[in-house]
Image: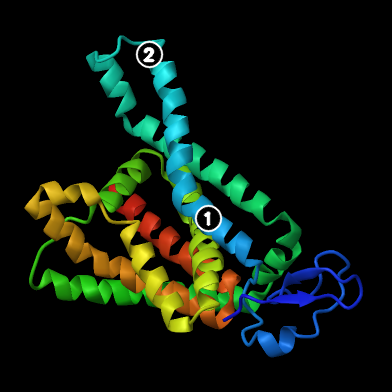
Amino acid sequence: MLFKFHKCRQCQNEYDITLDECPRCRYHNEEFDDAIKQKNLFWLPYSRQIALFLIGALGFQIIGFIVSIFISIYATSHFEINSEEYLAFIESTKINAILQLASYLLLFIVLVLTIVPFLKKLYNQFASVKALIKGISYGLLGLGLSSIYGLILSQFYQTDGNANQSSIETIVNAFPLTSLLLFGFIGPFCEELTYRSGLFNFALRINKAVAYAITIVIFALIHFDFQSFSDTDLLINELLNLPSYAIGASVLCYAYDKDGLGSSTYAHITNNVFSIAVIIIQGLI
């Protein structure tokens, strides 16, 4: 288990053994090469890994709730509460898009601020052309495997996509360019910091199998609509769409495990940008 501390020879500072140098004086960690087998991963102190996961997983909901309060305050100053105009405004696609964009932008800022001391290391993860090429390849692989699952599923049951997908499609059709930025680039970056650099890397300190299992399950479940338990047909639809997200999560975990954060993020971006492009093209036909 990688829950150890290394004492710096130069300044005597104790720090996480997964760091390749002392964060105080930048002296090389002599134990790094022996302790860390996968040096290509975006290693952070375990406290920051926990922070990334909690901020990404819970922070988005909290930020969204706060933003929605401000939207409600604005709406109540312009419409009568419970009037048709008020409800139409609150439930409109435009407000939903604003809520999503504001939440993701604020989440992006908070996540980056959490890893400020490691921004140079973060940049190095993305600077490689090799990471870009491999990331695109992993992204296409994920799309292919999900498509195969969809084709097999369609032979036995016809699904309409889950609630998460339907919500995204509505926003994309109304605001294609904003959606491309939001769901194509900002969203994947935030989710990779949260679930690969945060959750996967923290669980990897325990065991690789545990890291894969817990990350795949949680990543799939964040796309699941738990309100569907009130309707049998909706629940079946959500459950049948769940493996598609698990497949995507598996590919992203593998991309990160083998080639680092840059690769998994480029893969995630490839998957999302392609999916958004398909929705936009279908809307134009």
Q: Which mark is residue 190?
A: 1
Q: Quadrant location of residue 84?
A: top left
SS type, badge 2: helix
**Which residue is under mark 2?**
76
Q: Position of residue 202 (x, y in %)?
A: 54, 70
Q: Who is closer to the viewer here, 11 or 209? A: 11
Q: Which mark is residue 212?
A: none
Is residue 285 among what the camera can see? Answer: no
The amino acid on which the numbered mark 1 sits, given as a three-letter code, is Cys
Q: Is residue 106 left or right of residue 81?
A: right
Q: Is residue 41 above or below residue 116?
A: below
Residue that appears at 33% across and 64% down? 220
Residue that appears at 49% across and 46% down? 59
Q: Is residue 184 left or right of residue 119?
A: left
The amino acid on which the numbered mark 2 sits, given as a three-letter code, is Thr
Residue that appears at 21% across and 46% down? 227
- Crowd around label 2: few <14 · some 14–19 · many ≥20 (10 Å): some
Farthest right residue? 10
Q: Position of residue 261 (x, y in %)?
A: 58, 70
Q: Earlier in the sequence, mark 2 or mark 1?
A: 2
Q: Quadrant of the N terminus?
A: bottom right
Q: Who is closer to the viewer here, 194 or 154? A: 194
